Image (tube, rainbow, N blue to C red):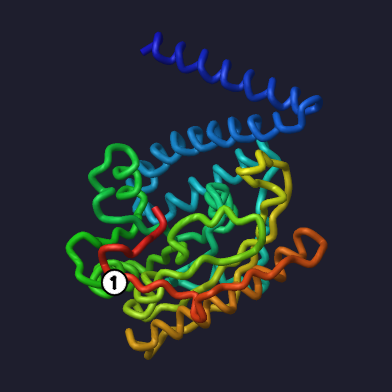
Amino acid sequence: MAAFLCYVGYFLAGYTALTLFFYMLSAIIPKSAFVARLLASYLALVLSSLYGVSASVVLRAVGLNQLTQWAVARSFKYIMGFSTGVTFDIEDPKGHLESVRPAVFIGNHQTELDVLMLGCMFPKYCSVTAKASLKKMPFLGWFMALSGSVFIDRANSKDARQAMQSAANEIRDKRQSVYMFPEGTRSYAKDPMLLPFKKGAFHLAVQAQVPIVPVVVANYSHVLWVKGLVFNAGRIPCKVLDPIPTTGLTAADVDELTRSTRSLMLQELYALTEKARGQSVNKAVTNDANGVAKVTGADTRVAA
């Protein structure tokens, strides 16, 4: 054990020294800052994961496992802020993150940096959603199960409504909120835009009869743009919009609910991006009038 800890210590010392080297090199070669912050981000993720393992065990033992993902998210926020200088400024003027529970929180999905966004805004008693097969995956699956993740069984479902039923029951019974990315994948967009929305999150909210709370993050390609090897320090605005009630809605209302929510979030995305950059932005035009992607239980995309 002592030898193992020694090797770990050497590795962390070497990794930290390499990261600092690239930070110093960025004074001469600006693109080196991309490598430096990338290395720092991976280290922050590892440290938060290690903390998450112990936190999940302790909080579950005292009956507070629903707080695990919130606690781990906050640790990632502080480590990333210190090591990279990147953070998200959360605007929640009406306190929805504290007062609305349970709910289905949804947000736009740009890059892997959205993990930090979750670290900054993640409300208490909330979790990500994941496909049920992840339960069997060593370490990650164990952590997600211990920390109260809401699992969705898509493999044995013929449509999205069936896939969401058990998750909807869990949300109601445990008063457990969830966070989902309805775009289903990262856009990596340089300018503000939204991919077509999958309908899984909206089916889930309607079946659980809980509100949808949109969370919109400004386009942050001026902070992180992978294709251009750009990774700068900065503060990125993120706004929590008013809850959208689903009480009384049925599956027949999901298409319109998806369309109207996407339209609302797109307009806020433009406004926030202009605020972040201090200049007007190009507004994307979609060829899909509704911006809605049809899904079945087999291809519903959820945050994992």
Q: Is residue 88 visible?
A: yes
Name the one closer to the observer, 137 or 53. 137
Q: Quadrant of residue 193?
A: bottom right
- What x and y, as percent, mark residue 229? 65, 39
Tell which of 57 and 237 is nearer to you: 237
Q: In the rendered view, would you say 24 is above or below 192?
A: above
Query: Can you give x and y, in whole percent of width and height, for residue 140 in the image?
Result: 34, 41
The one nearer the camera, 63 or 205, is 205
Instruction: Tell me: residue 50, above or below residue 168.
Output: above
Identify the residue at image location x=32%, y=48%: 146
Question: What amino acid is found at the position of numbered circle 1 in the picture?
Answer: Ala
Q: Position of residue 295 (x, y in %)?
A: 33, 70
Task: Name which residue lies at 40% across and 9% down.
Answer: 3
Instruction: Determine whether, in the image, residue 250 is placed left or right of residue 274.
Output: left
Report the residue marked by disc 1: 160
Residue at position x 47%, y 84% in the image: 245
Q: Quadrant of residue 118?
A: bottom right
Q: Viewed as shown, does residue 156 lie left or right of 29? A: left
